[in-house]
Image (tube, coloured by chain):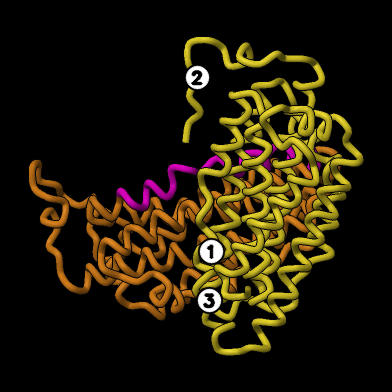
Chain colours: A yellow, B orange
């Protein structure tokens, strides 16, 4: 979806402060690193695919991540920011998340894809509400391409319907994914004050961080049920 | 190029025979497998990238391959062909090519990307001339997204300007890439009569196979010079 820009420059619709600007830049850089990290993880995990169709589905999802990256790269370029150096400060949190949640089976890889994508989307959307309009448009454009991971639901459901053991195992796995995601999100916020100030201080935005993480937990639970793991 | 009659639907401009139709389906399936194989090879080879920028360039190129795949998938679906089963018969030739040309350095990976992409493009364009118009349009659409590998030229040129040893080494490497590509192309043609008949019988198309391979060699040589390896 192309961001719409009505007559007035979007930059003028909020009170722009240097801090606020810097926070948006950094948020985009964080999201961008997330896309590239997800790209390489998806392609790694595709090795476990039982067949060509599975490998192709993973490749298509990975390609979609790079299309998102491209949107963020353009948005940052417009803001005068060179994306690659800006991204590197978020490498450790995102690489840690992936390292600590390396799937050991194809089903774990599928669940991680689905849960991870959805958590990222929740996070993006919460943040978008707190952003200046033009920046929110960028975030929503990045998200407009979701839905690629729907192919996961059928495969996971079939597997857990056939096996209680698989269901329990994958339910634990999905809890671990949420736990690690929250841990790493907290690290990012702790190390980057400008992000947390920005996020918490916005009236209609995330509000309080605890409430934010509670909401992530709730939508996560809904998704667990969707996959037949609840 | 096949004679066109204004106003007539593209399917009617050539004499459609079941064999000819089947050959187009199989050509698309071959190209599609090539895109998926290239996707996974690029992401594998990106491990050798010396920095994040290199990894991102490789990921963007890989994502472009999947966009090409999507064009071919849609074209085959319109022709009533399910792409995944159709692709599998070309797996061995393409996997062999990649297995026999696994780069051992980042520069080799870059050269392979550039030469491989270009060879594939040459091959596609030669074939396109021999196709019915609608099918030729699909092939040209797939090719319209080239240019991603231009970032390679600067990096390779800088490296071979600085080191004669690198230049000789990469020149040998590029010769090997061409050799393996031709070998595998010949296997594919030998095992799939319908493709070779289709390709050779077209009057103004590829004509003779030897001439075709000679032309590939010539454009390959031009590219070697472009990379500073000639």
Is B165 in front, or is B128?
A: B128
B157 to B93, vertically: above or below: above
Could you say where residue B202 lies in the image, as x and y percent from the top left? 24, 61
Question: Which stretch appears magenta?
Answer: B137-160
Label 3 CA crowd tier, 10 Å (few <14, some 14–19, many 20+): some
Chain that bears disc 3: A
Q: Which residue is mark 1?
A: B36
Chain that bears disc 1: B
Do discs 2 and 3 belong to a common subunit?
A: yes
Mark in the foreground, 1 or 3: 3
Is residue B152 one of those drawn in magenta? yes
Q: Which residue is mark 3?
A: A155
Relative to B40, is B204 on the left or the right? left
Is A157 in front, or is B35?
A: A157
Residue at (59% x, 69% y) in the render:
A225
Do discs 2 and 1 belong to a common subunit?
A: no
Q: Which residue is mark 2?
A: A5
Mark in the foreground, 2 or 1: 2
Residue at (43% x, 56% y) in the render:
B70
Q: Is residue B100 visible?
A: no
Q: Cα distance, mark 1 to mark 3?
A: 22 Å
Could you say where residue A39 lies in the image, as x and y percent from the top left? 67, 55
Q: Earlier in the sequence, mark 2 or mark 3?
A: 2
Is residue A114 one of those drawn in magenta? no
Q: Cα distance, mark 2 to mark 1?
A: 38 Å
Is B212 in front, or is B146?
A: B146
Q: Quadrant of the C terminus of chain A?
A: bottom right
Do discs 1 and 3 belong to a common subunit?
A: no
């Amino acid at each position: 979806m192309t961001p719409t820009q009505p007559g007035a420059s979007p930059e003028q619709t909020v009170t722009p402060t240097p801090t606020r600007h810097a926070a948006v830049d950094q948020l985009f850089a964080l999201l961008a690193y997330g896309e590239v990290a997800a790209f390489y993880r998806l392609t790694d995990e595709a090795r476990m695919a039982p067949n060509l169709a599975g490998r192709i589905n993973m490749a298509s999802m990975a390609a979609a991540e790079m299309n998102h990256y491209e949107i963020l790269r353009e948005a940052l370029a417009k803001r005068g920011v060179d994306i690659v150096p800006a991204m590197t400060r978020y490498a450790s949190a995102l690489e840690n998340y992936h390292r600590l949640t390396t799937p050991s089976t194809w089903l774990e890889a599928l669940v991680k894809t689905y849960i991870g994508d959805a958590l990222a989307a929740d996070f993006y959307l919460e943040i978008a509400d707190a952003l200046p309009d033009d920046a929110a448009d960028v975030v929503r454009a990045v998200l407009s391409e979701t839905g690629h991971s729907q192919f996961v639901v059928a495969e996971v459901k079939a597997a857990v319907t056939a096996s209680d053991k698989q269901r329990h195992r994958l339910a634990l796995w999905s809890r671990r994914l949420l736990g690690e995601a929250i841990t790493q999100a907290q690290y990012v916020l702790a190390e980057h004050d400008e992000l947390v100030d920005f996020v918490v201080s916005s009236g209609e935005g995330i509000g309080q961080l605890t409430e934010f993480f509670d909401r992530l937990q709730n939508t996560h639970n809904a998704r667990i049920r969707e996959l037949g793991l609840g």
